[in-house]
Amino acid sequence: MKIQDICAIAEQKGCTVQLNKELKDYTTFKIGGVCPAIIEISSAEALGELVKLCIDNSIKYLVLGKGSNILLDDKGFNGIVFHIGNDFAEIKMLDDTTIEVEAGCSLMKLCRFALEHSLTGLEFAYGIPGTVGGAIYMNAGAYGGEIKDVLVSAECIEPDGSVVAYTNNKMDLSYRHSAFQTNGSLITKGVFKLSAGNKDEILAKMNELMGKRKDKQPLEYPNAGSTFKRPEGQFAGKLIQDCGLKGYSVGGAMVSDKHSGFVINYNNASSDDVKKLIEYVQKTVKEKTGYFLECEVRIIDY
């Protein structure tokens, strides 16, 4: 079985197939070469069957949401990309304070849905440019909040195609980490438990945090969010700035002069530009401070 055969099955399952598309259009870094096939996933059943076909036939695959925490190669991806987006983004209330949402729903949409129902607990996530699936995968967080604080459970597809539900305490959620980063499970749904709140206060907090993002983060340039994880007892951005690296560039990639914790694509950067800059920052900070900055961005090679 070849890529075109899996694409044909995907269409039978109600998925949309796009051939030979540039992956830079699917990432917030705006970097990435051509992929033979991008399949817009329409259901958990379709995702499970298609992924199992890829595994059984040794076809490379990659699951993408909004592509907000990833660096793809300029040479492209020699396999199938399963895109979890608007075709797989249903959101509904289970009870007065519990929301069930499919993995392709954006965090922005989920936050606005919570606001409409006067539910508090997700304000920290407003403005994070990712999907629910990606947020669970990374245990996304900001301004003192994390996904693990409000996530009750997640429904996943295992590599063998079976559907499994994980409770919060089974996901190994910690700082920018979950079990899904190593166990091969694909997140299809999340259940969030929030609290009743005051709609005006919730909106005010969301607007306050969005204002902070715009003031402090280089949102005007393509980037993949915070490039490095926070070392214990320190801040990556401060360490980088203290090493004199603010504004340092390699090709079209640059350490943001607005926030040193971000590597930005300021001038048509290549994937190699970004990788070389990340390596240089890591090497310099280690030599000057003793801290090794672990990369938070997922780097996917060809």
Image (cartoon, grey):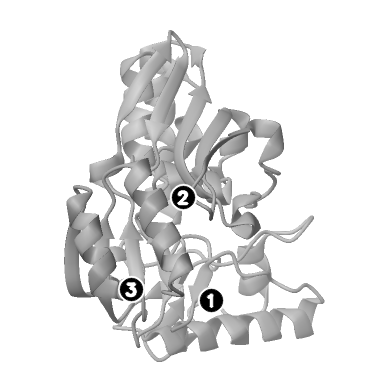
Pinpoint residue 150: horizontal percent, then vertical percent. Answer: 57, 28
In the image, taking residue 273 as reference, residue 144 lies left or right, namely right
Q: Badge 3: few (under 14), some or many (20 or more) residues near its Cα, within 10 Å? A: few
Q: Amino acid at mark 2?
A: Gly
Q: Earlier in the sequence, mark 1 or mark 3?
A: 3
Where the N terminus falls, by quadrant?
bottom left
Image coordinates of residue 292 in percent, x first then y, are 74, 74
Q: Residue at x 48, y 19 (%)?
A: 120
Residue occupied by mark 2: 134
Residue pictured at 63% horizontal, 55% vertical:
183
Kind of element beneath mark 2: helix
Crowdedness near tag 2: few (<14), some (14–19) or many (≥20) residues, C-alpha within 10 Å: many
- Residue at 46% across / 30% down in the picture? 123
Disc 3: which residue: 1
**2 vs 3, front mark:** 3
* Residue sitting nearer the eye, 70 or 5: 5
